[in-house]
Image (cartoon, rainbow, N blue to C red):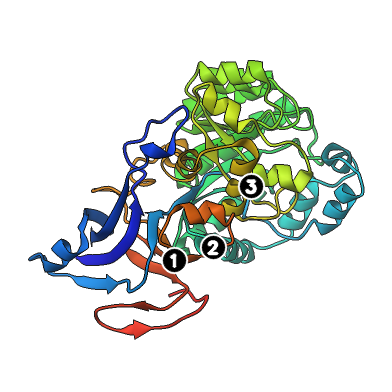
Amino acid sequence: MKLIGPFKQLLTMAELPARGPLSDDRLEIRANLGILVRDGKIEAIDDFQQLEAGSHPKTIEYLNDDFVALPGMIDVHTHICWAGTRAGEYAMRLAGKSYPEIAAAGGGIWNTVEKTRQVPMQELAGITATHARQLLEQGITTIEVKSGYGLAVDQELKILQAIAEAGKTSKADLIPTCLAAHMLPKDFDGDERKYLNQILNELLPVVFKKGLSRRVDIFVDGTAFSVQTAKDYLLKAREMGFDLIVHGDQFTTGAAQLANETGALSIDHLEAADDQEIAVLAGGNTIPVVLPGASVGLGMPFAPARRLLDAGTSLVIASDWNPGSAPMGNLLIQAAILSAAQKLTMAETWAALTCRAAQALNLNDRGSLKKGNLADIMVFKTENYQDILYHQGYLPVERVWKNGKCAYKRTLIESSCDRFFEVQEND
C-alpha cells in the first residue's frame, strides 16, 4: 500500500446531488488528511498522522508543503485525434466570417477530415498521445476522445484504432466515442440516410466486435444531420448496445427532445438552447454538457449553464478541444471563464469537472475521492481551494496521480524514500 499526504485541504466531491444548483457549503473540505492507496484504489482517507502510524505496510509519498487535493478532472468531450491545423480559418473568423460560412466554403470539419485521412494510424496515435499528455498535465485523468475526422468506414476504423493505440501508452484513461456521424462527407455518393445506413451496417458492427468503442455520437444541425434521421440512427445504435451522445443545439435548436427520446447520456454544446430546450432537458435524464472553449473559439455566446442548473438539470463542462472551433484545449481556464460569466459557484464548477462529469461517461468509479474509487488525484500548491478558480487557470497543477501512481510532477516534493526536483517532466 501507499500513503500520500498530508494535504492542507482535500475536497472529496463526494455525496453531492447529481442535478440542480450547488452552494459552496455543500462541499466536503477536510484538512491535514492522507490518502491510503491499495491496488490503484482509495483504501482510506483519514488523518495523515494516524494513517502514518498505522500497522499497514506502506510506502509514503510525503508532501512537505501546503497542497490542496481534488479528484482528477474528467474531460467528457474532446476531438484530440486529428492532423493538421486550421489557423487560417481562425484568422477568417477574426475577420468576420462565420463558422457556417467557412464550412460552406470547404473549411470547417471537412478541412480536418482531408488532412487526417492522409496520416497513417501510428502517426495519429502519436498525435493523440501527445494531446492526452498535455491534458494530463492539466490534471485531467480521464479523457473522452471522438473519432469523426475520417467520415468513411476504413478511415473511422483507422482513427478509433489510433485512439486505442494511444491509450496503451497514455497515463490518462482514454474513452473512445464513434462520431462517424460528424457530417455528411462531401465525397459520399448519397444522402444523409444512405450514409448513416452504411455506418450502421458496415462500421458499427466492427467497432462493437473489436471493442473500439461503446459510445456513438451524432451532430444534429443544419450543416450536419436532421433530427428525424438522427433519431433513427441513434435508436438502431442503441439496439446494437451503444451508449448514445448528441452534438446538439450549437447553432440551431431542436435536439433536446431527440436526446431525451433516445435515452442519450448527454447532449453536448447547447449554445443555442432556449427556454423550451432547457425545460425539455429538465424533464428528462440526459446530462447537459457545455463547451465554453467553442464559444471562445467561435466568438459566440456561452451555453446557458446557469439557467440549466436553476431549472434542475445536471451540468458538465468539457473542453471540446479540436483544431477548428475550440483550439484552446485548457479545460480549467474555460471553466473559470464560464463560471465568472454565468455566476456558477465553485461547487457547481468543480462538480461539472469531476463527479458530474463521471456520470456523463457512465463511470461510477471516479470523480470523487472516497473509499473504493480510483486514486485519481490532482494537487495545487495553495492553502485554500478557492485560490484555484480565483486565479482562473493561472495556478498550475503541481502533481497528478493516476490509479495511485505519480503520472506527472512539477515541483519539489519529498518522499520517505528519496527526494527529487523535476520541472515539467513526466515519469
Q: Secondary structure at mark 3?
A: helix
Q: Quadrant of residue 91?
A: bottom right
| Observer-nearest of 299 and 242 | 299
Are there few (<14), some (14-19), or many (20+) residues within 10 Å of tag 2? Answer: some
Are there few (<14), some (14-19), or many (20+) residues within 10 Å of tag 1? Answer: many
Give amino acid for label 3: Ile
Residue that appears at 55% across and 63% down: 129
Q: Earlier in the sequence, mark 3 or mark 2?
A: 3
Whether residue 350 is visible, yes or no, is yes
Are there few (<14), some (14-19), or many (20+) residues within 10 Å of tag 3? Answer: some
Q: Earlier in the sequence, mark 3 or mark 1?
A: 3
| Observer-nearest of 188 and 159 | 159
Residue that appears at 60% across and 21% down: 278
In the picture of the structure, the residue carrying the numbered disc 1 is: 381
What percent of the width, then of the height, locates residue 153? 65, 44
Above or below: residue 54 compared with residue 189: below
In the picture of the structure, the residue carrying the numbered disc 3 is: 337
Give amino acid for label 2: Leu
Relative horizontal placement of residue 183, taking residue 356 as reference (left or right): right
Q: Secondary structure at mark 2?
A: loop
Q: CA distance from mark 3 to mark 2?
A: 14 Å
Q: Residue furthest left?
A: 55
In the picture of the structure, the residue carrying the numbered disc 2 is: 395
Q: CA distance from mark 1 to mark 2?
A: 8 Å
Residue that appears at 57% across and 42% down: 178
**C-beta proximity under 8 Å, tags 1 and 2:** yes
